[in-house]
Image (cartoon, rainbow, N blue to C red):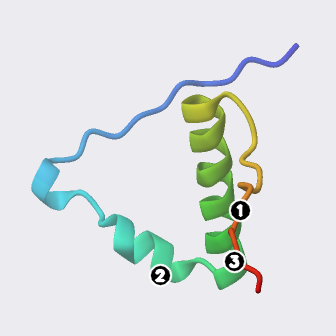
Amino acid sequence: MSRIKKTFRKVALRDQPSDLAYWQTRSYQARLAALEDIRREYHQWRYGGEPRFERVYKIVKRK
């Protein structure tokens, strides 16, 4: 069994790389995939499952 070496780098807050710069280097497919993962995790946390279509009813007055 191999061990994973823990590493970290201490950086001042003002020297921290921006999230925007990171995401600009990613392809649009990778950005969309990450967004879909976040959306799925949020719906799982908030609603306890995948979102479903809502039912929409429209009452129409007939002649």
Q: Is residue 37 rendered to the left or right of residue 25?
A: right
Circle nearer the viewer, 1 or 3: 3
Specify the quadrant of the image occupied by residue 20.
Answer: bottom left
Tag of residue 61: 3
Q: Residues within 10 Å of mark 1 (few under 14, many from 20)?
A: few
Q: Residues within 10 Å of mark 2 (few under 14, many from 20)?
A: few
Please identify the quarter of the rendering in which residue 36 is found.
Answer: bottom right
Estimate the spatial distance between the alpha carbons at disc 1 and disc 3, rounded to whole Å.
13 Å
Decide: is 38 above or below 4. below
Asked which secondary structure carries label 1, the reply is loop
* Three-letter code for the amino acid on which mark 3 is drawn: Lys
- Looking at this rendering, what residue extends furthest in the right direction? 1
Sequence-wise, the earlier of marks 2 and 3 is 2
The x and y percentages for residue 25 are 52, 80
Judge whether 28 appears above or below 12 on screen: below
Asked whether 12 or 37 is in front, the reply is 37
In the rendered image, which residue does mark 1 sit on? 57
Residue ID at (47%, 81%): 24
- Checking the image for residue 24, the label placed there is 2
Query: Residue placed at 54% from the left, 25% from the top?
Result: 6
Which residue of the protein is positioned furthest toward the top in this rendering? 1
Q: Amino acid at mark 2?
A: Gln
The structure residue drawn at horizontal position 59% and vertical position 77%, both measured from the top left corner, is 26
Percent x, y of residue 5: 61, 24
Q: Nearer the viewer, residue 11 or 37?
A: 37
Of badges 2 and 3, the one in the foreground is: 3
Q: Earlier in the sequence, mark 1 or mark 2?
A: 2
Amino acid at circle 1: Tyr
> Can you say which quadrant of the picture contains the N terminus?
top right
Q: Secondary structure at mark 2?
A: helix
